[in-house]
Image (tube, grey):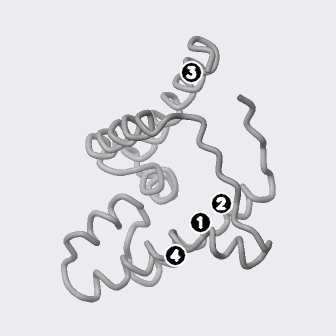
Amino acid sequence: METEFTLWQSLGGGVLIGAASVLLMATLGRIMGATGILAGLLSPEDAQDFKWRAAVLLGMISGPLAVMFVTGRLPEIQVPVSPLMLIIGGFIVGMGVTFGSGCTSGHGVCGMARLSSRSIVATLTFMLFTGVTVYVVRHVLGA
């Protein structure tokens, strides 16, 4: 399997994520961690809390529709693993989010920008295990 490097799409996405994170912190004083936003949506503090969380989640979900509006087609998505592997991967990520007290967006984007030592360690851990996983899957297992 070969991974295509998409410079402009990646840069654009990173700029949008960074801008959204800064705006959320500046306007509501909240961290833009995706799993925290979703968890809070399931048990919001009040109606206002639910509204901003729902707006962020709808923005995340509507991304492919925005791409279709601009390009005339939905983005192509290739998932090179079975549904069972997706479920197992989701479970492992959920455990990591729980034990790591947050996800890559909360720690990697917001926490590191605040120079949080916990977030720096968490992000380094994410990146280390991502590299190890890719190496094992591609070079040891030959997938």
How far apart marks 4 and 1 lie (CA) works out to: 14 Å
- Are discs 2 and 1 less than 8 Å apart at CB? yes
Few, some or many C-alpha atoms within 10 Å of disc 4 (few <14, some 14-19, many ≥20)?
few
* Residue at left offset 41%, top offset 61%: 34
* Residue at left offset 78%, top offset 50%: 6
Q: Identify the secondary structure beneath mark 1.
A: helix
Q: Identify the secondary structure beneath mark 4.
A: helix
Residue identified by numbered label 3? 137
Give whichever of discs 3 and 1 has the lower sequence position.
1
Residue identified by numbered label 4? 59
How far apart marks 3 and 1 lie (CA) works out to: 30 Å
| In the displayed structure image, the side of residue 9 where residue 89 appears, left or right | left
How far apart marks 4 and 3 lie (CA) works out to: 32 Å
- Are discs 3 and 2 less than 8 Å apart at CB? no
Q: Identify the secondary structure beneath mark 3.
A: helix
Q: Is residue 98 above or below residue 66?
A: above
Residue identified by numbered label 2? 14
Comparing marks 4 and 1, which lies closer to the viewer?
4
* Residue at left offset 78%, top offset 43%: 5
Q: Which amino acid does label 2 sit on?
A: Gly
**x, y (%) of residue 114?**
46, 59
Q: In this view, does 3 lie above or below 60?
A: above
Q: What residue type is labelled 4?
A: Gly
Q: Which amino acid does label 1 sit on?
A: Gly
Give whichever of discs 4 and 3 has the lower sequence position.
4
* Residue at left offset 54%, top offset 34%: 81
Comparing marks 3 and 1, which lies closer to the viewer?
3
Few, some or many C-alpha atoms within 10 Å of disc 2 (few <14, some 14-19, many ≥20)?
few
Residue identified by numbered label 1? 18
**x, y (%) of residue 119?**
41, 47
